[in-house]
Image (spheres, rainbow, N blue to C red):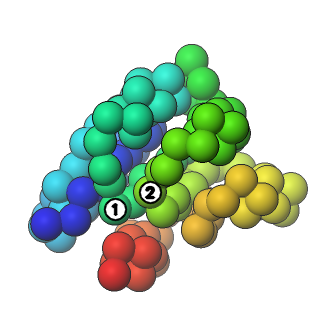
């Protein structure tokens, strides 16, 4: 069973993402801020991280920078963000993200992207 870490501070989005993924048979761990995710990643292995950019404690980009600086191996990463600016997409790519989709999500596209990244 593939393990996915969802890092999302909005309870509605967290529930939506988790429900979709659990229905598809994924093992889901929920983190609500970047600092919590940093500590979770240091201690566990995941096949994919679904990451919001705007997070309390440590935003998504800062989380990725910290993981890279500390040379901590982290899972493939799918950014799911309300920010649709090309600059944000370029920053995500430069930090090692595997893909980037914007909110509100298209559920079929979300599922397809997750399946692609976990296979």
Viewer-closest of 28 and 76? 76
Question: Which of the image's four quarters has the N terminus?
Answer: bottom left
The quarter of the rendered structure image containing the C terminus is: bottom left
Q: Which residue is drawn at the image coordinates 60% and 43% (left, top)?
A: 71
Q: Residues at badges 2 and 1 in contact (C-beta under 8 Å)?
A: yes
Q: Residue 44 at what x, y percent from top left?
A: 29, 42
Furthest residue in direction right, as rendered: 87
Q: Residues within 10 Å of mark 1 (few under 14, many from 20)?
A: some
Where is residue 56? Give x, y as percent.
56, 21
Q: Earlier in the sequence, mark 2 or mark 1?
A: 1
Q: Tell me the number on the disc at residue 75.
A: 2
- Secondary structure beneath disc 1? loop
Q: Which mark is residue 47?
A: 1
Which residue is at the front of the view, 61 or 72? 72
Report the Cα–Cα distance between label 2 and label 1. Answer: 5 Å
State left or right for residue 64 relative to residue 109: right
The residue under the point 54% across, 55% down is: 80
Would you identify the image quadrant in which residue 89 lies? bottom right
Q: Position of residue 112 (x, y in %)?
A: 39, 80
Residue 24 in sight: yes
For the point 40% across and 39% down, which residue is it? Answer: 41
- Report helix, strand or loop for mark 2: loop
- On the rendered structure, is 94 left or right of 20? right
| Residue farthest along the front direction in this orientation | 71
In the rendered view, would you say 106 is above or below 42? below
Q: Quadrant of residue 65?
A: top right
Instruction: Decide: few, some or many residues near mark 2? Use Cα within 10 Å; few <14, some 14-19, many ≥20.
Output: many
């Amino acid at each position: 069973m593939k393990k996915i870490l969802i890092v999302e501070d909005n309870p509605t989005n967290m529930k939506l993402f988790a429900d979709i993924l659990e229905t598809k048979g994924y093992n889901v761990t929920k983190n609500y801020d970047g600092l919590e995710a940093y500590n979770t990643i240091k201690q566990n292995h995941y096949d994919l991280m679904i990451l919001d950019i705007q997070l309390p404690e440590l935003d998504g980009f800062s989380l990725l920078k910290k993981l890279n600086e500390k040379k901590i191996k982290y899972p493939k990463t799918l950014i799911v963000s309300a920010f649709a600016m090309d600059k944000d997409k370029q920053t995500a790519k430069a930090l090692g993200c595997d893909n980037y989709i914007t909110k509100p999500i298209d559920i079929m596209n979300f599922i397809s992207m997750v399946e692609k990244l976990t296979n």
